[in-house]
Image: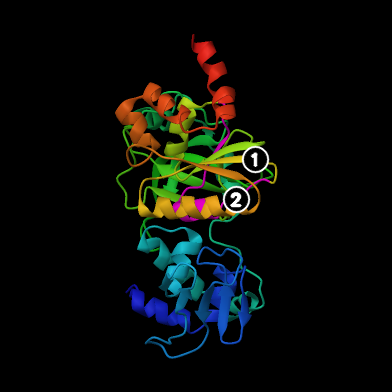
């Protein structure tokens, strides 16, 4: 029988330092605490994790507090936020995977060396290579259903007709068609992939528990649509950023895949302006604020783009691409409006 959340948290707390070294590797031990910037594994000292203590109560091992944000939680929260998971099923699966490591591998973690993660970059590269361009596939049909009639993906998206899926470690393996997006670092190396399993009709996602999953090394990396130099737009979802690309096909963009990963996105030193496509929810607000602060600290001007509805795909579907262009034009810096809108409108005219 699967362990309860409380039992998983207690078992993790028995080896708190190993958990911290694995998931909060940018921190360090100081006395009875592990210090790090925040629960997303950013460098710093505002978050502290208690390394020893009783199994329960206010001073329990594994409990943490972020003095800057007033957030707090246990080690299951650390796994969820540092890995960017949304569903507890994924958090529990990762916790069980970590707890199932042989003791020799636990010692390696305690010495600061990480075991190979489930779903390695090598596996991700193989899956992307086995997939094919999306033109004429169910992936293209799915995007059309989302209002993205012209797909400006810059080669970041592919389609796999029979991509493996397992609901959990005990479930049978299924195959579903999938849109496969490559996740790359700043040098263009594929570090992971994101899979969106699709209904075989092409009208929406597959009827499974978790139709979206990522594998590989995600933190700081993203799905990239076009090479960036001094201007970049960044947001959470693939469909969100492809919607923006419908209105601004020449602007380089990235999809970080979650609010947590957007907040931790690595930025090029050549950037001068960063547009942050905010999702209109509390997590989106926090991610936009965190990334904006990080950008400003290194001399990058950060400008938040706000949708009328929940996200820019909602806007595209509700109001159309012409309305989206008009709304975006008023939010861009004048030089970018001239660079990315005027040549396009001249071509249309």
Residue under numbered circle 1: 272
Query: Which residue: 41% across, 50% down?
Result: 284
Does residue 348 sit above or below 24 in this rendering? above
Does residue 251 sit above or below 72 in this rendering? above
Quick one: label 1, few (<14), some, or many (20+) residues within 10 Å? some
In screen coordinates, is 195 left or right of 343?
A: left
**2 and 1 marks in contact (CB < 8 Å):** no
Q: Which residues are magenta?
A: 250-268
Q: Quadrant of the N terminus?
A: bottom left
The dot on residue 296 is 2
Query: Residue 249 location in percent, x, y?
Result: 53, 26
Q: Which one is in front, 72 or 118?
A: 72
Q: Secondary structure at mark 2?
A: helix
Label 2 and label 1: CA atoms lie apart by 10 Å
The dot on residue 147 is none
Query: Residue 100 location in percent, x, y?
Result: 49, 74
Query: Residue 42 location in percent, x, y?
Result: 58, 63
Q: Which one is in front, 272 or 176?
A: 272
């Amino acid at each position: 029988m699967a362990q309860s959340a409380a039992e998983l948290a207690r078992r993790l707390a028995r080896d708190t330092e190993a958990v911290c070294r694995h998931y909060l590797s940018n921190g360090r031990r100081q006395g009875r605490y592990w210090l790090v910037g925040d629960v997303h594994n950013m460098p710093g000292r505002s978050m502290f994790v208690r390394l020893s203590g009783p199994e329960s109560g206010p001073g329990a091992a594994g409990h943490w507090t972020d003095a800057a944000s007033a957030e707090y939680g246990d080690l299951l929260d650390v796994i969820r936020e540092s890995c960017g998971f949304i569903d507890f099923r994924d958090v529990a699966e990762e916790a069980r995977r970590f707890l199932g490591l042989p003791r020799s591998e636990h010692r390696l973690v305690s010495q600061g060396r990480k075991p190979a993660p489930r779903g390695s970059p090598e596996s991700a590269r193989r899956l992307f290579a086995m997939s094919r361009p999306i033109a004429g596939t169910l992936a293209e049909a799915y995007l059309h259903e989302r209002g993205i009639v012209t797909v400006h993906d810059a080669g970041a998206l592919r389609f796999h007709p029979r991509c493996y899926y397992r609901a959990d470690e005990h479930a049978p393996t299924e195959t579903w068609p999938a849109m496969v997006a490559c996740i790359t670092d700043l040098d263009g190396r594929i570090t992971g992939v994101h899979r969106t399993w699709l209904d075989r009709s092409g009208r929406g996602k597959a009827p499974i528990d978790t139709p979206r999953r990522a594998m590989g090394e995600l933190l700081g990396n993203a799905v990239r649509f076009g090479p960036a130099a001094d201007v970049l737009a960044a947001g959470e979802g693939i469909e969100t950023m492809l919607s923006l690309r419908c209105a601004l096909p020449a602007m380089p963009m990235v999809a970080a895949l979650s609010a947590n990963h957007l907040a931790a996105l690595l930025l090029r030193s050549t950037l001068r302006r960063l547009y942050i496509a905010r999702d209109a929810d509390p997590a989106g607000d926090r991610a936009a604020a965190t990334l904006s602060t990080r950008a400003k600290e290194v001399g990058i001007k950060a400008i938040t783009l706000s949708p009328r509805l929940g996200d820019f795909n909602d806007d595209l579907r509700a109001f159309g691409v012409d309305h989206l262009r008009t709304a975006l034009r008023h939010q861009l810096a004048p030089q970018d409006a001239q660079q990315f809108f005027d040549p396009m409108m001249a071509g249309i005219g």
